[in-house]
Image: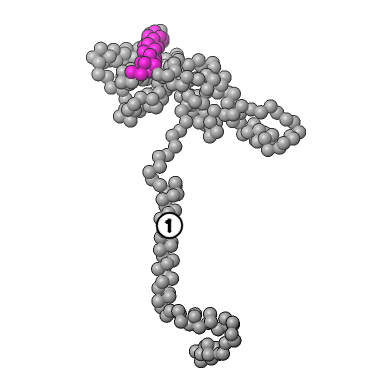
Amino acid sequence: MKLRATLVGLPRRPGSMRGVGFSCAASVRMPAPLLFQNTLRFSSSSSTSSSTSHSTTNPRTNPSKPPPRPAPYYSFFPRTLPSGPPPSGPFTISPRLLRQEYLTLQQRLHPDLLHSHHYVSSHPHPPHPRPPASPLPHPELTSSTLSKAYSTLLDPLLRAEYILHTQSPHPHHRDIEAAPSIDSPQLLSEVLELREAIEEAAGNIDLINKMLEENQIRCQNEEEYVGKLLEEGRWEEAWEGLGRWRYWRSMDGRLKQLEEDTMVAR
């Protein structure tokens, strides 16, 4: 402090600013505890505002942002299914055309081919240039997702379940995995008769084959009926038809298993 007084009291030359800044600093100097409190208050408010702005602008921490919806299976096959699912497009699908497009896409999704296309695109003058491939239906398409879409659309029953689950206005009040309910007395009578006939047909291969043909006709009729309802947008009736169709499909599986067991026992 003694040195500070000496410096402040030095004589000044006219026009010189030496010593002025020193005396001003001494006049506005605040106590150390108060300066420390103000510094803490400023740093805490700055960190709070920055964290608040980060939490509101960061999409990962924003719970109100809905997750992205997966791409519809129909869009993976634009050549075979250009009109999309019912009711805008038909329910019937050509298995041959669907398989051709599926195999073409799987070849392009093969890791070796993807690496080759990446090499060609990253080198302006590759040693063996190839014609540019057409873009994929979706950039995020993977081989496993494509296989799942293909198996779902190839099976008429799985296709109908997928359409109802993705296109009907209120799909969440229906449980696709639940057992179909039998509300019609006529359908209940047919179900009981078929169950009794399956039990009595054990060991009789001719009778089993006849029952298989009859049940496959039932499945075919339900497929045509539900497909027409889907194309017309009659969702509630299509849900009911789907329940009956699923039941006849399960009976078809039981009859085929009975046929296999009978052939093994011979």
Residue 21 appears in the rendering: yes
Q: Is residue 35 left or right of residue 247?
A: right
By secondary structure, the bulk of the magenta-drawn segment is best described as helix
Residue at screen point 52% across, 19% down: 80
Q: Is residue 175 left or right of residue 118?
A: left
Specify the quadrant that holds the C terminus. Answer: top left
Q: Is residue 70 left or right of residue 178?
A: right
Q: Residue furthest left?
A: 185
Q: Residue furthest right?
A: 127
Could you say which is closer to the camera, residue 193 or residue 61?
Answer: 61
Residue 226 appears in the rendering: no
**Residue hosting label 1:** 51
Q: Residues within 10 Å of mark 1 (few under 14, many from 20)?
A: few
Where is residue 227, by image quadrant? top left
Magenta extent: 209-234
The magenta stretch spans residue 264:
no
Residue at screen point 43% across, 57% down: 51
Eyeballing the image, is 61 above or below 75?
below
Q: Residue furthest front?
A: 14
Which percent across, then down, holds residue 184? Answer: 25, 15
Residue at screen point 33% across, 30% down: 172
**In this figure, what is the number of numbered marks?**
1
**Which amino acid type is shown beneath numbered disc 1?**
Ser
Which percent across, then down, holds residue 16? Answer: 59, 82
Eyeballing the image, is 22 above or below 250?
below
Residue at screen point 74% across, 31% down: 128
Eyeballing the image, is 211 above or below 56?
above
Where is residue 229, by image quadrant? top left
Q: Secondary structure at mark 1?
A: helix
